[in-house]
Amino acid sequence: MSKKILMADDDVVILKVGKFNLEKAGYEVITAVNGEDAVETARREGPDLIILDVMMPVMDGYTALLNLRGYEETKDIPVIILTAQEGGVYKQISVDMGAVEHLNKPFNPNDLVEKVATLLG
């Protein structure tokens, strides 16, 4: 059975590129368009890994990450932050909040697939 990944981003192009490349690598991909939707979808679907954008409407990615860590069913799901927020301070914030990786946009889809493969084994 393929591993399930939840990808949350308000940019439809990012979602399409990420979904296409991850599915091509054999993963099942579900999507969300804001942080609140990501939290609800993660609780309902139980993905093996979550990829979160930071700057999203309704609920930003960092708030979504804090919410995910607060629920028993989602607290241990690895999270990759994928954001246009560059710089070491943002990477440190991501790690301090519980993300396992921080990738900057624009991103190389192959790098994303490699990070996911490393995290999911």
Image (cartoon, helix red, strand yellow):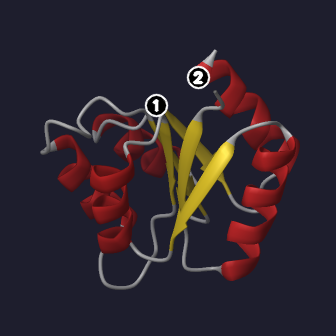
Callout 2 amino acid: Leu
The residue shown at (40%, 38%) is: 99
Is 97 situated above or below 32? above
Determine the secondary structure under disc 2: helix
Side (left or right) of 115 relative to 26: left
Determine the secondary structure under disc 1: loop
Kindly report the distance in space between the C-alpha atoms of the residues bearing marks 2 and 1: 9 Å
Q: Residue furthest bottom?
A: 57
The picture places residue 64, in percent across and down from the top left corner, at 29, 60
Dot 2: within a 10 Å radius of its alpha carbon, few (fewer than 14), some, or many (20 or more) residues? some
Pointer 2 with pointer 1, Cβ within 8 A: yes
Residue 14 found in image quarter = bottom right
Q: Residue furthest top?
A: 121
Return the residue at label 2: 119
Is 40 situated above or below 117? below
The residue shown at (46%, 74%) is: 55
